Amino acid sequence: MPPTKRPKGKTGPWSSPRVFNSSSPIVKTDIHAFLVRTISGWNSGTETYTEAEKRSIIDSLPPAYQKYEVDGAGHLTCPLATEFVLDDPYIKAAVQGFKTDITEGYYEKTWQNQARKAMQERRDGKFDPYLHEHTEDTFGDPGLDCDDLDEGVVDAEMESSDGEWMGKKTIKAKAPGHDKRASQSQTQMLRQKRKV
């Protein structure tokens, strides 16, 4: 039996099954420049796109930019200025985020299926016992309220990651109505927790 031929649309680096894989050529392609060329080609006056293609591009824009305005010749005009696409920091950040997500494999079917399954498991409460068990490790003592501490008290012995707090004198502002002995015992309790 002769080998079956695959349809050409299903193979190659730009085929739909491969375009969102982590090894996709999109990762190395300058998508921002492509968007700028798309908009500037539209505005150049030459008939780069058919009216159906223009309508499809406008349909893919956010609702605020879906404007179907017609010029004097009856052709759809681009609702975006080339300068907007060229200079907008949000577009640049979104393009970079999209490429990072593709590189990390977030658009691959296996990852998408795992994400859907994990969302359903979280919704069903599968991880609730684990979260309740580890809440104190992550967020501190759940029984200790912020109201129990003096406002403005900063521990001088506490270290920061860059070492700026070490050795600096701190101002201890007492809130009215707080007992000095109670605040000292709470401070000692917090120091003991940090040492553990």
Image (cartoon, helix red, strand yellow):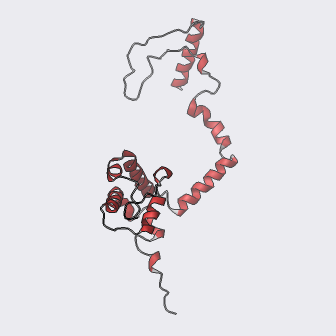
| Residue 95 locus on image (x, y percent) | 40, 53
Check the image and report above or below for 126 versus 177. Answer: below
Q: What residue sits 39% from the left and 48% below the top?
A: 93
Q: Quadrant of residue 15?
A: bottom left
Which is nearer the eye, 188 or 149? 149
Check the image and report above or below for 50 versus 188. Answer: below
Q: Is residue 141 left or right of residue 22?
A: right
Which is nearer the eye, 74 or 134? 74
Q: Quadrant of residue 9?
A: bottom left
How many numbered discs, if any? 0
Q: Residue furthest bottom?
A: 1
Which is nearer the eye, 108 or 67? 67
Check the image and report above or below for 142 versus 100. Answer: above
Q: Is residue 120 left or right of residue 111?
A: right
Quarter that holds the C terminus: top right
Mark yes or no: residue 3 visible.
yes
Check the image and report above or below for 192 versus 68. Answer: above
| Residue 101 locus on image (x, y percent) | 45, 54
| Residue 26 locus on image (x, y percent) | 38, 62
